[in-house]
Amino acid sequence: SQKIEQNSEALNIQEGKTATLTCNYTNYSPAYLQWYRQDPGRGPVFLLLIRENEKEKRKERLKVTFDTTLKQSLFHITASQPADSATYLCALDSGYQKVTFGIGTKLQVIP
Amino acid sequence: KAGVTQTPRYLIKTRGQQVTLSCSPISGHRSVSWYQQTPGQGLQFLFEYFSETQRNKGNFPGRFSGRQFSNSRSEMNVSTLELGDSALYLCASSSTSGTLETQYFGPGTRLLVL
């Protein structure tokens, strides 16, 4: 069956360190993958999109990698800050013009 | 530009009732998608409307329906509510249809079914 897996446990990290979040998928062949941030009581906010032919994408302190062989995307936040604390969702093109979301990973950056 | 707005923000209903949720997309956006978010299942796609036509539908029962008006505003209706329908309902707008388009989400409507 098709699955998107994100670290379901919360990730706690010390301020200033690099946070790495994982998104694994099975039985999909996405043309691209997206990452969103969601704060409590709010809708998700788009962060980055990476296409299948791109290995890495950066935006300020954010970096996303996409390995179609491993069927995995990694999302990095460098020099993490308490304001980065949120839930991060990955989403992929699941075919038939649909987007499928992972359940999200809650990141807590400790001062 | 004003963001996506959803009304109401909170709603309490009882089993068997029906509910209508509203979404106003960003001005100029013609595509509206609806999602259900629960802690156990995450974000699940309900349907997408583009230029008043349903373009896509997720795996939800027929009790869930929607429509889009000529001004791109959209409504979602759930009939015969069940306890399991308690969730955060999010709508997202994008300028055109297509999965590569960035989706802009509203704050959601939190529905509690008692």
Image (cartoon, coloured by chain):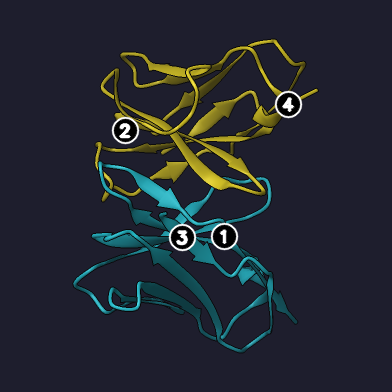
Q: Are tags 4 and 1 found on a single chain?
A: no
Closer to the chain start, of discs 4 and 2, is: 2
Farthest bottom residue in view: A17
Q: Quadrant of residue A56?
A: bottom left
Q: Look at chain B in the picture and name its colour.
A: yellow
Q: Residue at x 45, y 58 (%)?
A: A3
Q: Which residue is mark 4?
A: B83
The answer to whether mark 4 and mark 2 are in CB contact below 8 A is no
Percent from the top left, x then y, of residue B75?
Answer: 48, 18
Q: Residue at x 28, y 46 (%)?
A: B99
Asked whether A90 or A48 is in front, the reply is: A90
Q: Are tags 3 and 4 found on a single chain?
A: no
Q: Are tags 2 and 1 found on a single chain?
A: no
Above or below B32: residue B66: above
Q: Mark on residue A4?
A: 3
- For the N terminus of chain B, the image quarter is top left
Above or below A28: residue B28: above
* Pair 3/1: label in front: 3
- Distance Cα–Cα, label 4 vs label 1: 24 Å
Q: Is residue A70 left or right of residue B11?
A: left
Give the amino acid at mark 1: Gly
* Pair 4/1: label in front: 4
* Pair 2/1: label in front: 1
Q: Chain of mark 4?
A: B
Q: Mark on residue A104?
A: 1
Farthest left residue in view: A53
The answer to whether mark 3 and mark 1 are in CB contact below 8 A is no
Disc 3, SS: strand
